[in-house]
Image (spheres, helix red, strand yellow):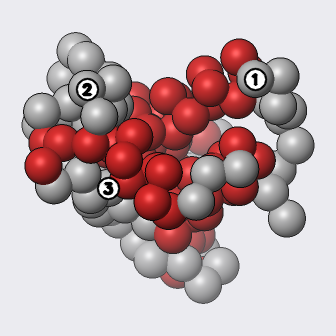
Amino acid sequence: MGERAVGRNVSSFRQLRREEANRLIDALQVALGGQPGGMRNRDRARAAGTEGRRGSGRDMSTLVGQQDLDRINDALHRLGWDQARFEAWLRSPSSPLGRRRSDPQIRTVGDANRVWWALKRLLKRSGQWSTRRPE
């Protein structure tokens, strides 16, 4: 597969140029049933972890996914909050969404991160924080 993707015989990864390595990675992703191109997993993970931070330098926003919303809902469940209390908190002056308090919807990964980080602080203060993953 490597020779077909790169167009020449390569005996070491060190011999690959960047564009050849990208073509080889794309070919491997397709062979494993994935989608070629786009953001690499490392870039996607970095973006997901830093989106919403001040000074992260990202100009683009990513739409929030179900996994992010599930993490927030797990935190709400552990805090014992219902939807009304959560929405009231998002509309309050201490809202992690800032000035958008009149329309406190979690639309982007940055929004979800800001809400999650605030909920995580509340869980830690209440002694309910654990590193366990939601089931």
N-terminal-most mark, 1 or 2? 2
Badge 3 amino acid = Ile
Give the labeled residue for mark 2. 93
Specify the label residue 106 is tagged with.
Answer: 3
62 vs 31: above or below = above
CB atoms of marks 1 and 2 within 8 Å: no
Mark 3 touching mark 2, by CB under 8 A? no
Q: Which residue is located at x 58 percent, y 60 percent? A: 82
Secondary element at image label 1: loop
Amino acid, disc 2: Pro
Disc nearest the viewer among 3 and 1: 1
Name the residue: 19% across, 23% down: 57
Q: Residue 80: in sight, yes or no?
A: yes
The residue nearer to you, when weighing 39 against 51, is 51
Q: Position of residue 71 (x, y in %)?
A: 62, 53
Q: Quadrant of the C terminus?
A: bottom right
Q: Position of residue 31 (x, y in %)?
A: 61, 81
Label 2 element class? loop
Crowding near the residue tagged with mark 3, few <14, some 14–19, many ≥20 C-alpha atoms within 10 Å? some
Residue 73 lies left or right of residue 45; in this view the side is right
